[in-house]
Image: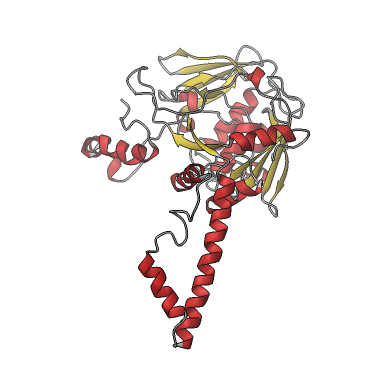
Amino acid sequence: MFHDGARRRSVALLTTGVLALPAVAACGASEEGNVPAARQDIEPAGRDLVADGSTLAWAIDAVPGTLNAYQADADGATNRVAGAVLPALFTLDDRGRPQANPDYLESAEVVEREPRQVVVYRLNQKAVWSDGREVGAPDFAAQWRALRGKDPAYWTARNAGYDRIAKVERGKDDLEVQVTFDKPYAEWRSLFSPLYPKDVMGTPDSFNDSARGTLKNTAGPFSLKKVDRKTGDITLDRNPRWWGDQPKLDRLVFRAVAPEDRTKALTAGRVDLAPLTPREAERISLAGRDKGARGPLAHGPGAGRTPADALMSWAVAHGTEQEAAAAEQVAREQTREAVATYASEQKSLGAYEVRKALEPAFTQLALNGADGPLADERVRRAVARALDREELAETVLKPLGLPAEPVG
């Protein structure tokens, strides 16, 4: 569905047929070389090799109930939208390590550790919200106050890290933000990403309600044009105020497509990019393998039937017991239709290849030590030591074809 003069590219894409199969790479803060690099079969392309223009339709599970990533009903689609329209101070490299995002930061570093940890952010002077206001300390302070967990009027889902901040203040000028922590916080780079404007975070009412169906003020390469809950489309356009490298796409559409319907949506051209389950990926791989083959497919509806099963079905359908014969005839017709539909879809899917793309991220099991038995550090240590970390890693990562080695 690459529009606006991109018909030729659309045909080329369908011919090469690349589908993304996302996986989560287990990475952490350990030294490079401690964790084996996971393999993917997609090579990065330089910006100069990517054509300008067109629209990309990206499958999501559903239109999210909120566009505020810090609320309890936020989901993966919320994060997709936020990642395109809001500041992310740090991004992860191909090994899952945080890197300062130069579109928003000139620098960010711990300048003091005693008596308290102090982090100073130096902001990119070009970074502005879509209303023209600079991204600055008021936005950091508003987000901290909303997420620190001291005001129950804010319907927040989490406050990790923000609850350790003592104060957020302007530095030596408008482009500097100074954050002082009550307690040391090693994961400070995870904070303020995404960063919302103060008009969303500033009051409980605005936090709870203003970003549920829209984001009027953004500061990413894209801006939010429309959320259509009837069609299931979230439409993003290029941000005309964007100061960084211009997006290659004119428009990005997140389209609600249930996971079980994505192969049909791909063959119908409703979406261009769809995260796939391993089962769907296997089906598409089989379609490529079967391309040009003759005879019935060895998989799909009716594939498990033996000659004896088929003979018995025919005998029942043509027997003297009218009710049984009629029911069997209906079942045989339904099977024929299902086989024909499946074969037609497989023929279309044969134009695609499945490629594995790794998402730089990490998965961790965290123990809640706020109250209850786990409030005792000795209990937490005992639980942690009792866990079989290697078995957990294998359970989560091996089905994805990723290195099953725990971090640290």
Q: Which quadrant would residue 404 be assigned to in this image?
A: top left
Q: Residue at x 68, y 19 (%)?
A: 244
Q: Residue at x 60, y 16 (%)?
A: 102
In the picture shown, does residue 96 fall above or below 343? above
Residue 369 visible, this angle: no
190 and 288: which one is in front? 288
140 and 256: which one is in front? 256
35 and 401: which one is in front? 401
In the picture shown, does residue 306 fall above or below 161? below
Image location (x, y in percent) of residue 108: 53, 16
In the picture shown, does residue 338 fall above or below 155? below
Give the side of residue 404 with respect to residue 149, left or right: left
Give the side of residue 97 with respect to residue 223, left or right: left
Image location (x, y in percent) of residue 93: 49, 22
Q: Residue at x 48, y 86 (%)?
A: 323
Image location (x, y in percent) of residue 111: 48, 12
Q: How is the image coloured?
A: secondary structure
In the picture shown, does residue 40 fall above or below 226? above
